[in-house]
Amino acid sequence: MLKVENVTKYYDDFRAVDNLSFEVDKGEIFGLLGVNGAGKTTTFRMIMNLTPPTEGKITFNGKKIDYDVTDQIGFLTEERSLLTKLTVKEQMLFYGALKSLSEEVILKRLDKLLERFKISEYKDRKINTLSKGNQQKVQFISAIINEPKLLILDEPFSGLDPINIELFKSVILELKEKGTSIIFSSHRMDHVELFCEKLVILVRGKAVLSGYLKDIKKDYKIKRITIEGDVSKKELQAIEGVITVNKNANSYTVNIKDESYAKNVFDYLKTRNSITKYAVEEPSLEEIFVAKVGEAYGE
Ligand code: ATP
């Protein structure tokens, strides 16, 4: 289990991470979310022991993360760090050796992974001749060639097309099934939503929301009603408990203060002639994220 306890990081006088704590269990997928500059990469760098925390403690399975433990960790960095003049195979032999793997093990795993990522034909090609997406696959393979127990993914889906996003997702889910603890950052809430069970939202290095996604959604009082049919935006807005009404191409989205106000909206709809859809739904993670980050900035 990865344990981050009361971690604070200062760069000179600037506090980039502020008293952050969270845990990622075996086989759990954890999302580290936040706008640009929130402190995600700094947190990853501290977990990898690339920069020390100013205060607090980070352990993996009870041990400080040092040279011995890094063999059990895989890291996909945001800035992507491939040795582009090498071939895919040479790069993997280099990375694998850094993780204390024998050449035989590296080559065996590499063949399997290249096949899984559908790029077997590029094994002896120089990395700088591959497309961006394929380079990202190579980078991802180097992060998992050591079959890590802890996998850290900084923006793993950026720059990928939808087909490859699905491919990456399915590989990540396979790793989870095998017991790998996975921690990843993303700006795309739709990815996070489909994917992670537990998360923390950072604002200026501070956690403004954390916990299991299903609890966060349940506890978030504001609900969303989707309506299709003949209604008036003005009349919806006048209903007690309604916060906002948005008109979409073929529907209306109404946010209400809490579920108890759904009845008021329903009573109004009964006075209309043709309603084809009425659904009370939980808010999306995107809505919660925007609200929480806005609140933290005092908007
Ligand atoms: P992004 O989503 O844009 O990658 P992030 O959440 O990963 O952002 P960090 O890169 O961790 O954010 O940066 C957090 C804050 O710390 C930013 O304000 C950044 O300018 C600052 N920072 C990061 N690295 C350093 C450094 N080496 N020296 C000084 N300040 C730094």
Image (cartoon, rainbow, N blue to C red):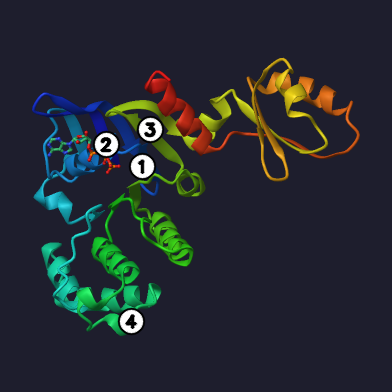
| Upstream in sequence: badge 4 or badge 3 | 4
The image's mark for residue 25 is 1
The answer to whether 3 is drawn above or below residue 266 in the figure is below
Instruction: Check if mark 3's residue and mark 1's residue have beta carbons within 8 Å.
Output: no
Q: Residue at x 17, y 68 (%)?
A: 96
Instruction: Kindly identify the amino acid type of the residue bearing the numbered disc 2.
Output: Gly
CA gap, disc 2 to disc 4? Answer: 37 Å
Q: Residue at x 55, y 25 (%)?
A: 219
Name the residue beneath numbered marker 2: 37
- Residues packed near mark 1 inside 10 Å, few (<14), some (14 to 19) or many (20 plus): some
Name the residue beneath numbered marker 4: 120
> Could you tell me which secondary element the residue under label 2 belongs to?
loop
The quadrant of the image that shows the N terminus is top left
- Nearest to the eye among marks 1 and 4: give it: 4
Q: Does the image show residue 52?
A: yes
Task: Provide residue 172's location: percent of width, then percent of height.
Answer: 40, 58
Instruction: Kindly identify the amino acid type of the residue bearing the numbered disc 4.
Output: Ser
Instruction: Check if mark 1's residue and mark 4's residue have beta carbons within 8 Å.
Output: no
Instruction: Kindly identify the amino acid type of the residue bearing the numbered disc 3.
Output: Ile
CA gap, disc 3 to disc 2? Answer: 12 Å
> Could you tell me which secondary element the residue under label 1 belongs to?
loop
Who is closer to the viewer here, 268 or 283?
A: 268
| Upstream in sequence: badge 1 or badge 2 | 1
| Upstream in sequence: badge 2 or badge 4 | 2
- Residues packed near mark 3 inside 10 Å, few (<14), some (14 to 19) or many (20 plus): many
CA gap, disc 1 to disc 4? Answer: 33 Å
